[in-house]
Amino acid sequence: MSQSSESTQSSRSSRSSQGHIFVTRRIPQAGMEILEESGVRVTVFQQDEEKGLTKEEVIEGVKSCDVLIPLLTEPIDREVMSANDKLLGIAQMAVGFNNIDIDVASELGIPVTNTPGVLTDSTADLTWALLMAVARLVPQSHNYMVAGRYKLWGPNLFAGGDISPGGSGKRKVLGIIGYGRIGAAVAKRSIGFDMDVLAYDPFNKKGVEADSLAQWAEFDELLEKSDFVSLHPLLTPETHHLIGEPELRRMKSSAYLVNASRGPVIDERALVRALRQNWIAGAGLDVYEHEPAMADGLAELDNVVLLPHIASASLDTRGKMATMAATNALAHLKGEPAANVVNPEVYDTDAYRARVSRG
C-alpha cells in the first residue's frame, strides 16, 4: 500500500501487537488521540481532506487490518468485507450507514457501528441557517456587497420572504417531513419565530401526536399548506425521490424547500425545473442525489443556497463523532459489544464467534 501514511504518533505505537486499525481518511484529532493512546497500530490511508479512496485501496487496507474506520463516502460491500476473514468490526464515523451493506455484514459476522445522537442540534441549527439564508437571500446579498455593487439603498433591494409573521402579521407554516430527533429539534427552534408546525412521519405518527410543538398532517396536506418544507426522513426505498415533480407542483409558489437529510430524497432534476420555472420560491440544500455532483443547472440558479454536506460540521460535534468512532473501533478490536452497533444480532452468530477466535 505505497500511498498510505501513518501519523507520527501512530508510527510510535505501531510496535504494539494489540491489533491494527485502518482509517480510510483522517478523522478529527480527538478521535485520533484515543486510537493512538490505546497502543494499537493505526494506519491512516488518506490525510488529504479532498482526496478519497478507490475500492481497490479500501480492499487492500481491509486485508491487513483488524478493524476498519470508514466514512460514508466509501462503499463497503461484500467484496470489501470478504477481503479479510479476521476483520472484527467496522466503526463508521457518521450517523448514516447507507454506504455499508448491513445484511452482508451480519451474514459474515461483522458488527457495524455508527455515531448517532451527537449531531442532532448541529444539524437542526444548520437547517435553520439554510432556511433563513434562502428566504432572506443572504448569500446573494453578500455576493452583491463584496462585488462592490451596492451603491444606494432601495426598497426593492433583495426583498425576500419572512420567516416570522413579519409585515403581513400572518404566522408562517413550517412543514417537517421525518419527525425523529432532528425533526423535533428543528420544530423546537420554530418557537422564536411564532410559526405553526405541521409534521409527517409514516414511521412515527405517535411521536408527532405526542409532541405539543407539532400537529400531524398527511403528506399532501403538509406540502399544500407549508411555507417552508424541511426534510428529515431516513433514506429507504420508500423515501427515495419522496419529493419529485408532483410534490413540487403541490407546494405553494411562495414556499421554500430545505434538505439536510439525504440527497436522494429529492429528485434533483425535477427540483431544477421547479426552481427555474418558479413552481416554488427557493431551496436550500446540504446534500445531493449524486454527491458530490449536482444536477445540471442547479449551480447556475439564483434561488438556491448550496452547501457541501456540513450539517454536523461544528468542531465540538465532529470531535465527538470521532471519539465515538474510535471508542467503537477499540471495542470491536477487543471482541466486546460496542455501544452503537447497528446490527446487534451479529454478536449471537457463529460467524462472529469464528471471527473473534481467528483474531
Image (spheres, grey):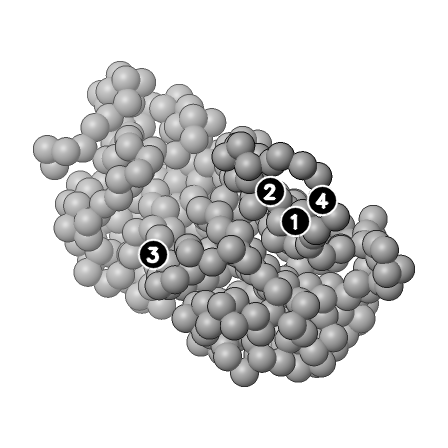
Observer-nearest residue: 133 or 66? 133
Mark in front: 2 vs 4: 4
Return the x and y of residue 352 as percentages of the image width and height. 33, 57
Mark 1 and mark 2 in contact (Cβ < 8 Å)? yes
Observer-nearest residue: 49 or 351? 49
Whichever of labels 3 and 1 marks the residue nearer the N terminus, that label is 1
Mark in front: 1 vs 4: 4
Q: Secondary structure at mark 1?
A: loop
Whichever of labels 2 and 1 marks the residue nearer the N terminus, that label is 2
Residue pictured at 23% horizontal, 45% vertical: 53
Q: Which mark is residue 154?
A: 4
The image quadrant of residue 142 is top right
Q: Is residue 25 above or below residue 354?
A: above
Label 4 to label 3, Cα distance in Å? 37 Å
Residue pictured at 79% horizontal, 63% vertical: 172
The amino acid beneath tag 3 is Ala
Q: Which mark is residue 158?
A: 1
